[in-house]
Image (cartoon, grey):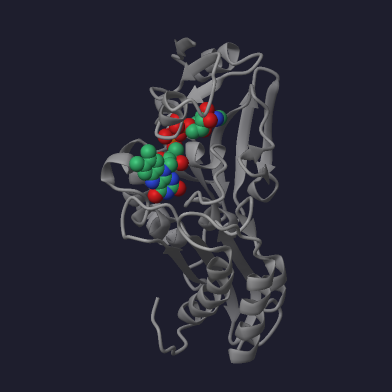
Amino acid sequence: MEFLRAASVDEALAAAQGGAAFVAGGTNLVPDVLFGRKKIARAVDISRLDELRFIEEADGKIRIGALASVTDLLESELIRAAASPLYESALEFAGPLVRNRASVAGNLMDASPAADLAPPLLVQDAVVELASAEGERSLPLSEFFLDYRKTAVRPEELMKAIVIEPLKTDDRCAYYKLQLRRAMAIAVLGVAVVLRMEKSVCVEAAISLGAVAAVPYRAQAAEACLRGKEVGEAEIETAAEAAKDSAQPIDDVRASAAYRKKMCGVLVRRLLKKALGMPQTVAV
Ligand SMILES: Cc1cc2nc3c(=O)[nH]c(=O)nc-3n(C[C@H](O)[C@H](O)[C@H](O)COP(=O)(O)OP(=O)(O)OC[C@H]3O[C@@H](n4cnc5c(N)ncnc54)[C@H](O)[C@@H]3O)c2cc1C
C-alpha cells in the first residue's frame, strides 16, 4: 500500500486523483485494513490538515470541518446551543479515546447504518461539501447514503465540511441511542427528532432513524403525520406507528429485527412526548 501524508487540501486532492482512501482519525479505516475487510492501494493521510478542523457560524448556518472530532463537538458552545441532538449523540459516542480521534466526516463516509452522528445531522438538514481536483459540489445528507456502506461520494472526492441549519431556541428536540451498554457500544437504534411549533401546531417536523435500515434516513411518513397539525396523543401515536412501519431492520448480534422495529415506534413516541414536554410513564 502506498501511503502519502498531505500537507494541504490541494496536495490531498492531487494525490487522490484516480481514487484513494483518505485517513482522518483512522478509527474505522485502520481496523478495516488490519483485519482484511478493506484492501487499499493508496492511502492519503489528511489528519494534520488543521484547515479542515473547525466549527463555525457562517451565513446563518453552522459549518463543521470534516476533521472536527467528536470531542470538538462536545467542547463547542455552538453545537451545544444550536445542535443539541448532535451534542447528545456525541455524549453517547464510544469513549473518550475514540472521541478524540473520530472525525465527523469519517463517521459519515464509513456509511454504517448505525453511525451515531447521522440521525442528528439528518434532522438539521445537513449538506456535505465535497471537493476533488475537478472542483467542488454540495450534496444533501439525505441523498448521500445510497445503500449499505455505499455513498454518493466519488473515490477521488474529499469531504471538506458539513453544513447544518442551526436550531432555534424554541425548537423542541430530543435524541436517544438505544445501546446494550452506556459506552463503546454500537447503536441498536438511534433516533433524533426536531419539532418547530407555533402554539400547539407543528409547523416543521424532522424525525430520523439509524440502525433500522441499510442507511440512516428521515422518516418522512412519520413527519407528515405531525406537520401542519395540532399535535396531541393521537398524532404522536400515528407518527410513532408510521416510523415503525418505515423501518426495515435486520437481525444481528445486538438485537432481533422484530425488537428493533417495535422500539422504533416506542422511542419515536417517547421522544416526541419528551420534546413537547408531555407527561409519560417511562422517561427517556
Ligand atoms: C472502539 C471503537 C468504538 C467506536 N464507537 C463508535 C460509536 O459509538 N459510534 C459510532 O458511530 N462509531 C463508532 N466507531 C466508529 C468510528 O470511530 C467512527 O465512525 C468515526 O467517526 C470514524 O472517523 P475517523 O476519523 O476515525 O475515520 P477514518 O477511519 O479515518 O475513515 C473512515 C472512512 O471515511 C473516509 N474518510 C475519512 N475522512 C474523509 C474525508 N474528509 N473525505 C472523504 N473520505 C473520508 C476514509 O477513507 C474511510 O473510508 C467506533 C470505532 C471504534 C474502533
In front: 172, or 190? 190
Which quadrant of the view contains residue 31? top left
- Seen as rendered, the residue at the extreme left is 96
Residue ID at (66%, 43%)? 144
Vertical order, 30 against 248 (above or below): above
Q: Which percent across, then down, holds residue 97? A: 27, 40
In front: 252, or 122? 252
Q: Is residue 71 visible?
A: yes
Locate ligand 1 by image quadrant: top left
Residue ID at (56%, 74%)? 262
Q: Which percent across, then down, holds residue 36? A: 48, 25
Q: Which percent across, then down, holds residue 81? A: 40, 60
Which quadrant of the view contains residue 42? top right
In front: 47, or 185? 185
- Seen as rendered, the residue at the extreme top is 2
Q: Is residue 42 left or right of residue 31?
A: right
Vertical order, 59 against 122 (above or below): above
Residue ID at (61%, 36%)? 129
Residue ID at (54%, 68%)? 193
Vertical order, 95 against 167 (above or below): above
Q: Is residue 65 visible?
A: no
Q: Which percent across, then down, holds residue 151? A: 65, 38
Q: How many marks?
A: 0
Q: Quadrant of the C terminus?
A: bottom left
